[in-house]
Image: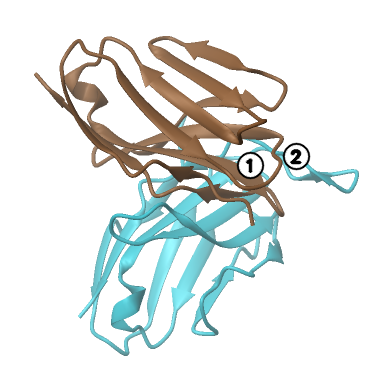
Chain colours: A brown, B cyan
Amino acid sequence: SQQGEEDPQALSIQEGENATMNCSYKTSINNLQWYRQNSGRGLVHLILIRSNEREKHSGRLRVTLDTSKKSSSLLITASRAADTASYFCATHYGNNRLAFGKGNQVVVIP
Amino acid sequence: GAGVSQSPRYKVAKRGQDVALRCDPISGHVSLFWYQQALGQGPEFLTYFQNEAQLDKSGLPSDRFFAERPEGSVSTLKIQRTQQEDSAVYLCASSSQGLAGGWVREDTQYFGPGTRLTVL
């Protein structure tokens, strides 16, 4: 099965700094998605990047995709305290179900 | 508009009890998914509905788990004779698309807040 797997990181950064996290997957994909999860808002879809795209931006988020290495990265620029959360990458497989990685815990210190 | 809602938000059950978890998807969404998320892990797929049809239940961990969506909207996940290893957050997600022309449409899934189940 396809499985997104983040580098097992727990990032602790100062507000205003950038945060980068990585994800790898095992099989070919049509797209890869990033989700954020915190206690306040549950699991929220952030951004989707298709397999024919190499980079995508959404606000302070920048996602890259390298299909030759089967990896993706998520960059959050100018981090804010509200960015404190767990971040998951996910890929589709089977009947549209998502396979999630273990997640990266990011703590932004005000 | 209203998102996916789940109830109850928290459930404590004694081992051996049956529980029922409810999901109200976004109105009009064809596809509905259940995921199980253990502490410190990512969500794992349990089952998938397209309208009222349960098309995939391969992720259900045992025959104690049962899900239904009889009218193609609200869904219930039932766990019989709960065990301590069932303790987890149960997430429901819906998406607007379903199978089309035999091809699965990969579509954004919108998640509910989850039900945190604790089995004592």
Q: Of residues B31 and B28, which is closer to you in this image? A: B31
Q: Quadrant of the C terminus of chain B?
A: bottom left
Q: Are marks 1 and 2 on the same chain?
A: yes
Query: For the residue labelled by badge 1, is the local secondary structure a helix, a strand or a loop?
Result: loop
Residue B105 image label: 2
Outermost residue toward the right in this view: B101
Total number of numbered discs in the rendering: 2
* Residue count near mark 1 (Cα–Cα under 10 Å), binned few <14, some 14–19, many ≥20: some
The residue shown at (74%, 45%) is B98
The residue shown at (62%, 17%) is A54
Q: Position of residue A82 (x, y in %)?
A: 22, 23
Q: Is residue B53 above or below residue A27?
A: below
Q: Is residue A15 above or below residue B64?
A: above
What residue is disc 1 on?
A: B29
Q: Is residue A34 left or right of residue A95?
A: left
Query: For the residue labelled by badge 2, is the local secondary structure a helix, a strand or a loop?
Result: loop
Which one is in front in this view, the residue at disc 1 or the one at disc 2? Answer: 2
Q: CA distance from mark 1 to mark 2?
A: 13 Å
Q: Is residue A5 above or below residue B47?
A: above
Q: Of residues A104 and A37, which is closer to you in this image? A: A104
Q: Position of residue B5 (x, y in %)?
A: 41, 47
Q: Position of residue B20 (x, y in %)?
A: 41, 72
Q: Earlier in the sequence, mark 1 or mark 2?
A: 1
Asked if disc 1 and disc 2 are in contact, CB closer than 8 Å, the reply is no
The residue shown at (53%, 20%) is A64
The answer to which image quadrant residue B63 occupies is bottom right
Amino acid under disc 1: His
Outermost residue toward the left in this view: A110
The answer to which image quadrant residue A68 occupies is top right
Q: Position of residue B116 (x, y in %)?
A: 29, 60
Amino acid under disc 2: Arg
The residue shown at (37%, 83%) is B18
